[in-house]
Amino acid sequence: MSNKIVIALYVLPALLLIMAVVYVPIVLTGYYGLNEWNGIGAMTFIGLDNYKELLTDSKFWTSAWHSLLLALFSGLSLILYLVVAMVLASRIKGANLFRKIYLIPMLLSSVAIAQLWIKIYHPTNGILNSLLESIGIANPPAWLAESNLVLYALFIPILWQYAGFYILIYYAALKNIPASLEEAAKIDGASAFQIAWKIKLPLVMEVIKVTIVLAVVGSLKYFDLIYVMTGGGPNGSSEVMASYMYSEAFKSYDFGYASAIGFFLLIICLVVTWIIRKLTATKDTIQYS
Amino acid sequence: MTSGSAAQLQGGTKGSGSGIARKLGFSLLYIVLIAVAIFQLFPLVWLLFFSLKNNQEIFNLPPLSLPTSPRWENYAKVWESGNIDVYFFNSVWITIAATALTIILGSLVTFAITRMKWKGSSFVLGLFMVAMMIPVHSTLIPLFSMFSKANLIDNPLSLIISYVAFNMPITIMIMLGFYYALPKEVEEAAVIDGCSVNRMFFSIVLPMTSSVLATTGIINIIYNWNEFIFVNTFISSDSFKTLTVGVQNFIGQYTTDWGSIGATLMISILPILIAFLFLSDRIVEGIAAGSVKG
């Protein structure tokens, strides 16, 4: 067998698969977005009408705003994770056990997490309100049913799910810093906090950038947990871009419009990735010697 | 945002120094870590407790009271009458099939890219890597219509195809690092001995990569076991649903029976928890290696 045939046999199955399942669909999404289509019947080409409608669709922009808020919360929560990871990495006994415990929620399906937290937030029998009542707070809110609270309530399980993941990444990065650097700084009289701030933080900056991209882009396409916990409700107050797309497609059967949303989501994710990379790239110029 | 995080770090941690303060600070650190651990475990402990109680015990006793007479019948009930057994075995075989296919196809590609010279190999690798950035949701509607046309809607094959394709990039990415670090001497000797490429791959390289096969296998298993949106979109018959969607349906029908819901959730997460108990180091390694996937 010639090498060319071997290479084709080795590469083509996987390559054709991702072409058919990933690349062809994103082109099709863009194309469907130019059509009026209910998913079953014939498509009618309508040019950019769907995209124009998108620009003035307040429901869509509300959902985009919610996605953005979640992205912002996720970005900010990285600070918390980094602090915990710094603590863990500072020669704590049992650090390995701690980081494993932290990781457990990350291993569970979003559906299980969502169902568990629905029960936690249950207005009368949930553990949260039971605890609140037991410390004397009468009539605690029905978290997932309050339109001004629901997005924050949804963010707690997200925090719970991903904390261990980011702590794990930061911990690994911090453990990679040679101990000699810390020793040298200590001899020079640096405090633990100066070491964390001036030596460790700059050295893990690369990893921090990656996690910012992960957290922000991950939040922009957040779906499972919200779909199960609230379905975007009450009254659209927890609708995010992906859940809005899903309900336009599989509830309203407006596949053309939903495809336009899907294509927009793709563009946003790629652009945001690019912007964050650009924004954070400039900080590379700091030198540590 | 990064500078903000740095500022907070410094602001929150300035001003400690002498020995006693240090020791105090150290125990404070432990308190923080333990608090986080409690936050992470507490919901699951509560879940375990209420999965072993009946409604009357759940609603009338304090939420953290031990299930003094554990009601294992909750588990037996949902396993048999809630169709959970069917969902469970669907999850098992679909997860295993998709994972096996992914790591085999991924190994083949990684081998061809790292061990053979050919035009376009870096372009092909680029295609795999860029695919990692594509949100699943943006492909969902075309995939749905493609699978409909191919008569694969409500067929587990649609799930397996999608899982393999979407987990392929991260699998290849993890394998690449391993293959690059793998010494080539053994393979070179095999070539000199006149060993064919196929034999070399299957009987020499593949066994040598068993540790990366395990790492990628584990993260594939976790992703596939927990996958929701494809099952929810492509599968409509109860007989093909996996646990994530099955659990969702079951709970939709029995919203008021907390014990059964708890038992269902426990059944759906137990395999992963048990695996974690025995393979935690390997899983931690896999999650860290696969961290670029969101």
Image: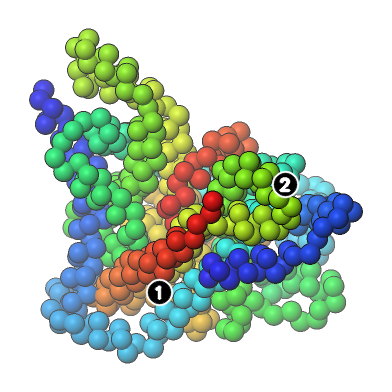
Examine the rendering and report whether any part of residue B255 can be seen: no
The residue lying at 35 percent from left, 38 percent from top is: B176
Determine the residue located farthest toward the right in the rendered image: B20
Examine the rendering and report whether any part of residue B174 can be seen: yes
**A9 up-or-down from A48: above or below:** above
The kind of secondary structure element at disc 2 is helix
Seen from the viewer's position, the closer of residues A101 and B18 is B18
In the image, is B226 to the left or to the right of A261? right
Judging by the rendered image, the residue that carries numbered circle 1 is A241
What label sits on residue A164 in the rendered view?
none
**A14 up-or-down from B207: above or below:** below
Residue A169 point in image, percent of width and height: 54, 50
**B64 up-or-down from A34: above or below:** above
The residue lying at 72 percent from left, 67 percent from top is: B12
Question: What is the three-letter code of the residue carrying label 2?
Answer: Ile
Task: Give residue B194's quadrant in the image.
Answer: top left
Spatial distance from mark 1 to mark 2, Cα to Cα? 52 Å
Residue A277 point in image, percent of width and height: 39, 64
The kind of secondary structure element at disc 1 is helix
The residue lying at 68 percent from left, 43 percent from top is: A183
Name the mark nearer the viewer: 1 or 2. Answer: 2
Which class describes the residues within 10 Å of circle 2: few (<14), some (14-19), or many (20+)?
A: few
The residue lying at 72 percent from left, 46 percent from top is: A187
Q: Chain of mark 2?
A: A
Task: Give residue B148's quadrant in the image.
Answer: bottom left
Question: What is the three-letter code of the residue carrying label 1?
Answer: Met
Judging by the rendered image, the residue that carries numbered circle 2 is A187
**B108 up-or-down from A175: above or below:** above
Q: Chain of mark 1?
A: A
* 1 or 2: tag closer to the N-terminus: 2
